[in-house]
Structures are given as C-alpha cells and as structure tokens.
Image (cartoon, grey):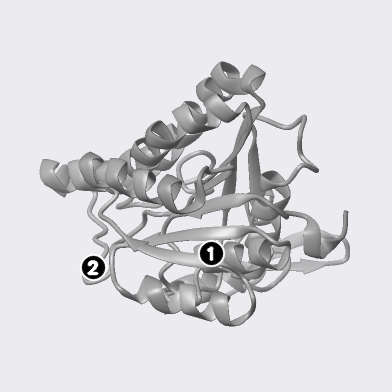
Amino acid sequence: MTAKTRFQNRIALITGAGSDSGIGFAAARTLASGGARLALTSTTDRIFERAKTLNAGGCRASGYTADLMDREQVMQLVDRVIRDFDRIDILVNNAGMVQVGKEETFLQMADLPPNEWDESIARNLNTCFNVTHAVLPHMIKNQYGRIVNISSVTGPLVSNPGETAYSAAKAAMVGMSRSLAIEVARHGITVNNVAPGWIATGSSTAEERTAAENTPMGRAGTPAEVGDLIAFLASDESTYITGQLFVIDGGNTIQECKGPGCVFQGGAHRFAPG
C-alpha cells in the first residue's frame, strides 16, 4: 500500500469541514491524498467551495449542508450520502465549537443562562451523537468502520474559566466513545478521539496565539498535523486501537510551568521576574 492508495475505495464523511483553514478540511485533504472519496458537511454553502477544491485536485468529493443539531436533518444527510456513495467507511466528527454567524461566549457557570448551556451541549456533544447514531447501522451491516471524534484537551484534561459547557461536552464525548468502542469492536469498527491543544486556524484569537507560544514547542500546531493523526486513526494502520484519546498539543498539558513568566534554563524551569 502506498500513500496514494492508503484509503483507496474508502468513503469518508467529515463534519465541520467548511473552513478552508480548519481541522476538518485539513483531514479531508489528507484522506483525499490517500485516495478516499469524501462527503463533507457544514452549516453553510461554503462547503461546496471546499468540495470544488478537492475535485479540482482529482478527488471525488461532495458537499452537503445540514444543521447537525437537528436529528431529522442528520438522518436525511446520512441517507443522501449512502445514496450517493453506497456506504460510509470512515466518520470524522469534527463539527462543534461555534457555528458561522454566531459568537462564542465565555460565561462563568453562575452567570450562564441554562439555554446557552443546552445549546453548547447540543452543538459540541449532540452533533457527534446524532451523526454517529445515524451512521452506525450502516457500518455494522458492512462489518467495518473507523470513527474519529475530535474532542479537545479542554474538558478531558484541562479547562478554562467560562467554558463549563464546552468542557463538559468534550469530556462526555470521550466517555461516550469508550462505551461505544466496546459495543462495536466485534463488528470491525474502531472509535477513537483526537484532543487538539492550541491549533492555528482561521478562528484563532490573539490570546490563543500567545498561549501557543508558551507550549514546549513554542508554537501552535497546524491543522495539517492534526489531519495526519486523524488519518492514521481512520486507516487500516490502526486496526487494534480503539476507545483511546490521543492528545496533540505540542506537550502543553504535560508541563507544570506555563506562561511568559516561566523560562527554561540549565535543565530546569525557573520563574523569571516580571
């Protein structure tokens, strides 16, 4: 098997692939380079531009718009993909974080309106459940599947003030994946999670870019680097790996000393004044 035939004859559904600088589209590029045929989703028509780009490079890709928080729309989406491609071998659940046209809010729990909690859980957890639940019967029928859920270090490992709902959703995604991995292992289906840290996407804020400079590697990760990890877990190179969480954060969560006031000298950390 060569790099160009790694995903030959595989059909991949990738959610949240609308941004040309995001993780979803980076994963799509990597899978396409290995010969996969792709179904891409987002909430807006920009997904058709992403599919057009991939088709221009020789990949067969189709774009679909759907609100993945709406279970009826999800069922219709999966039915359309199955009709167009015959099956789904690989599912990358990348949708979440924030929808186009809506601003992300950071409110401490005491100030968080319950409806915003519900919306964040729906966007960051229920989307993953809805699509996976709709795709699973097809994978079980075919006795094959690779499910890769894009979680985060935020929630399963660390957190920030004002992110209780997001943290809860991403941690719950990992717990859900572990149970599902046990349920479907004997059907030839694996379920794994990728937990990115600071990744340089088009939506990165100035604060996030500064935080990335204080990782051990001194930089943010790239969507392509995350895409490579997704591709490994989606491939037949990972047949005996399931129910796991893979952190890709440049070592940020393993360091105790963080921030611009913390420097590395003489083999040990020390706090720098000011």
Give whichever of 114, 55 is nearer the camera. 55
Give the spatial CA distance, label 1 vs label 2.
Answer: 19 Å
**Picture coordinates of residue 27, whole percent (x, y):** 60, 62
Left or right position of 245 against 70: right
Q: Quadrant of residue 140?
A: top right
Left/right of residue 156 with respect to residue 229 in the rendered view: left
Residue 30, image x and y in percent? Answer: 67, 65
**Residue 199 picture quarter:** bottom right
Asked which secondary structure carries label 2, the reply is loop
Q: Residue 103 carries which label?
A: 2
Q: Which mark is residue 23?
A: 1
Q: How crowded is mark 1: few (under 14 residues within 10 Å), some or many (20 or more)?
A: many
| Amino acid identity at mark 2 | Glu
Above or below 51: residue 137:
above
Residue 57 vertical position relative to residue 14 in the rendered view, above or below = below
The structure residue drawn at horizontal position 24% and vertical position 47%, both measured from the top left corner, is 73
